[in-house]
Amino acid sequence: MDKSQNAQEFIAQQRQAIASNPDCGTSHYNLAVALMGVQEYDEAESELLAAIDCSPGLAEGYVQLGAICLRRGDLEGCLEWNQKAVKARPGFSEGHGNIGFVHLQLGRVDDAIVSLKRATHFNFRYVQAFASLATAYLMKGEVENSIEASRQALKIEPDFPIAHNNLGIAYMEKGDFDKAIEHIDRAAALDYEVAPQILEELQPHRKA
């Protein structure tokens, strides 16, 4: 049985579960996630709204609604749903991470740092949040803090390309070109698209 058949079977099962128990928030949520998997976003949105209506504490439901907003390019909508997620469950690291990510996209660097630090506090293995935190610190010119956040990301996932790219840029800022080249080359080897101006700037510092 292929994946699409599996997905359709799962969707049918969840519809059945909802028919026999319409007030089960988890069934609405499970159906929504499955619908998102087959790119039925409008119906998924309706099911997520039903899920949080039945279960207002279902923080994952708010986060998925935020993901649908993000898909549409609605950053403020994404931010609002994730704020509702952390209101429903204050220690929900994914919600804090998403809030930080949106703040970063909107250029609100200080707000991003606050949220990303919360995300890594509640989940010390949240590699994406550490990488975003490193980016935020770079944007503020806080090079040492950026290096520390990238190192934390690489402790969790040694081949995380964004962290290598951020470390490369941070070491460039410090004038440590050997380390910068090492990390930029590692990011490129991991299929990260390094900015051409970074490669250009490092070229004169490469050993023959």
Image (cartoon, rainbow, N blue to C red):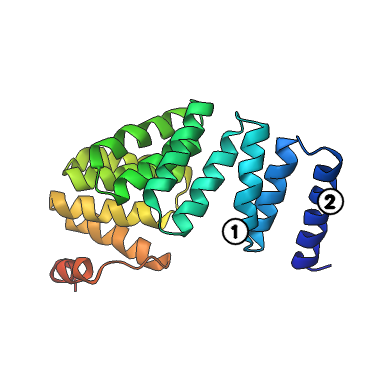
Query: Mark 2 and mark 1 in contact (Cβ < 8 Å)?
Result: no
- Place residue 206 in its image quadrant: bottom left
Q: Nearer the viewer, residue 83 or 173?
A: 83
Residue 154 seen from this side: no
Q: Residue at x 37, y 37 (%)?
A: 116
Query: Mark 2 = which residue?
Result: 13
Q: Nearer the viewer, residue 207 or 165?
A: 165
The residue tagged with tag 2: helix, strand or loop? helix
Q: Residue at x 30, y 44 (%)?
A: 134
Q: Nearer the viewer, residue 70 or 201?
A: 70
Could you give the CA–CA distance between mark 1 and mark 2, rounded to whole angstroms?
19 Å
Question: Where's the C terminus, which quadrant?
Answer: bottom left
Q: Position of residue 93 (x, y in %)?
A: 48, 34
Q: In the image, 24: left or right of 32?
A: right
Callout 2 amino acid = Gln
Residue 104 vs 95, above or below: the answer is below
Numbered circle sitting on residue 41:
1
Residue 158 vs 91, above or below: the answer is below
Count residues near mark 2 (Cα–Cα under 10 Å), then give few for <14, some for 14-19, many for 20+: some
- Place residue 24 in its image quadrant: top right
Q: Position of residue 106 (x, y in %)?
A: 28, 49
Callout 1 amino acid = Tyr
Residue 86 vs 184, above or below: the answer is above
Q: Position of residue 202 (x, y in %)?
A: 18, 66
Residue 192 vs 113, above or below: the answer is below
The residue tagged with tag 1: helix, strand or loop? helix
